[in-house]
Image (spheres, rainbow, N blue to C red):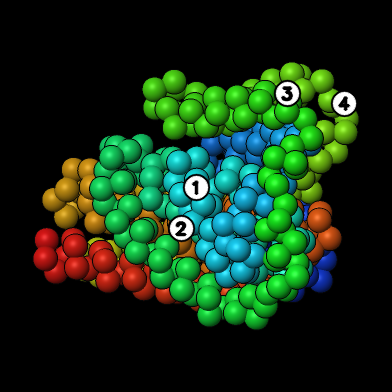
Amino acid sequence: MSITAWLSVAIFAAAYVLIATEWVHRVTAALGGAVLMLLIGATDAEHAFFSADAGIDWNVVFLLLGMMLIVAVLKRTGAFEYLAIWAVKRARGRPFPVMVILVVVTAVASAMLDNVTTVLLIAPVTFLVCQRLAVPVAPYLIAEAMASNIGGTATLVGDPPNIIIASRAGLSYNDFVNHLAPLIAVLLVVFVLLCRVMFRSAFRADPERAAAVVQLRERDAIRDPRLLVVSLAVLALVTAAFVLHSVVHLEPSVVAIVGGLVLLAASRLDAAEVAADVEWPTLAFFAGLFVMVGALVHTGAVGALSRTVADAVAGDPHLAAMGLLGGSAVLSAIVDNIPYVATMSPIVADLARAEGSTGGPHVLWWALALGADLGGNATAVGASANVVILGLAERAGQRISFWQFTKYGLVAAGVTVAISAVYLWLRYLAFA
């Protein structure tokens, strides 16, 4: 690699240390690192702002912005209070059953929508539930972020890396469902059991509070019925457009921002007040992170590492699949999985072709998808949903530190990736 490539690696590592240790705010570290990447020539304005492979992913930024606008309007209707009371009543005020409901709903919704959209919708409900029951909110938010990454792995639209993989490998929506959904169902059950162990200290119920919430009526929480109807109509149309992405040929980012602006206009609310609820620091953090990772891609640092891994496992399908699964999990925990998968997918295509496959549902593609999606659970910055959750928690005054998330994420990622390795070996290698 060139000197510039090594410098870009050093800057990224330093920024990552600052984010992990929280010596400076993560937004400052990400934007500062991005500026240094530009100054040393590891990237330039054209690549940083306009490159699809080595710059800011505007699809992610505008998807977030659009959904944040929808959530900002929707929360003024009382819909989240309604759902919070409903969830608590169904669980009879018991904290662990409440978490199970929220985790399962999050995972299923992430498979139908995408993980970022889902956590934006479920987090406000979680804040209200935890406030009602007087339980710590951090364990619930962390569990939901991880559940969204697990559930999103099941379908083509659930996680952005899956869309890249589908395009490169010629995979359909049904291919993802047939090959990954059965495994994800098992992983979700395992994850719920893990939650019972990892967050056991958060499940101390307050009988008086639980009894008080059970007596509430959900309908009384709705403050603006007209706005609720309009918001749900827009959300339904946005959701349908997400699901029918391959039919309507509109990027999720376009759908989300159009939906957000239409709802803002139809709501008759003050635009400045709604815009104030947008998580601008989170959007800035993503921009900085994308520029830093894009610089690693542009200088060839990520490509060199990917080719080294590919060369080491070439010729042995068992080693290739397991190495790709584990390597993808580790790298996706450190860098954003979108540029990683974009860089790795042509290498996987060559490996699959060398093993006699012309694409389609090959084990290496599933190893890449599972490693990239599930590995994102390992750290607080490993997946977009994790970053969004941290931003929402900080805004609500319930700050979650990097290591508070990561100490649970490493366990969840390790267990789910290990089970995935067994699944890949049994289904595609041992008894293929």
Q: Position of residue 67 (x, y in %)?
A: 65, 36
The numbered mark, 4 or 2, whose residue comes first in the sequence reads 2
Whole-number angstrom distance, CA of label 3 to CA of label 1: 27 Å
Front: mark 3 or 2: 3
The numbered mark, 4 or 1, whose residue comes first in the sequence reads 1
In this picture, is 304 found above or below 425? above
Q: Foreground: 225 or 298?
A: 225
Whole-number angstrom distance, CA of label 3 to CA of label 2: 35 Å
Q: Which residue is mark 4?
A: 270
In this picture, is 292 found above or below 280? below
Q: Which residue is mark 2?
A: 150
Kindly identify the amino acid type of the residue bearing the numbered disc 4.
Asp
Whole-number angstrom distance, CA of label 2 to CA of label 1: 8 Å
Whole-number angstrom distance, CA of label 4 to CA of label 3: 16 Å
The numbered mark, 3 or 2, whose residue comes first in the sequence reads 2
Q: Which residue is mark 3?
A: 226
Which label number is shown at residue 143? none
The 10 Å Cα crowd at callout 2, few under 14, some 14 to 19, many 20 or more, is: many
Kindly identify the amino acid type of the residue bearing the numbered disc 2.
Ile
In this picture, is 182 found above or below 198? above
**Image-based side of 371 in relation to 93, left or right:** left
Work out whether residue 301 can be spotted.
no
Q: Position of residue 5 (x, y in %)?
A: 58, 58
Farthest front residue in view = 215
Q: Which residue is mark 1?
A: 110
Marks 3/2 in contact by CB < 8 Å: the verdict is no
Q: Residue at x 64, y 65 (%)?
A: 93
Q: Foreground: 138 or 77?
A: 77
Whole-number angstrom distance, CA of label 4 to CA of label 1: 30 Å
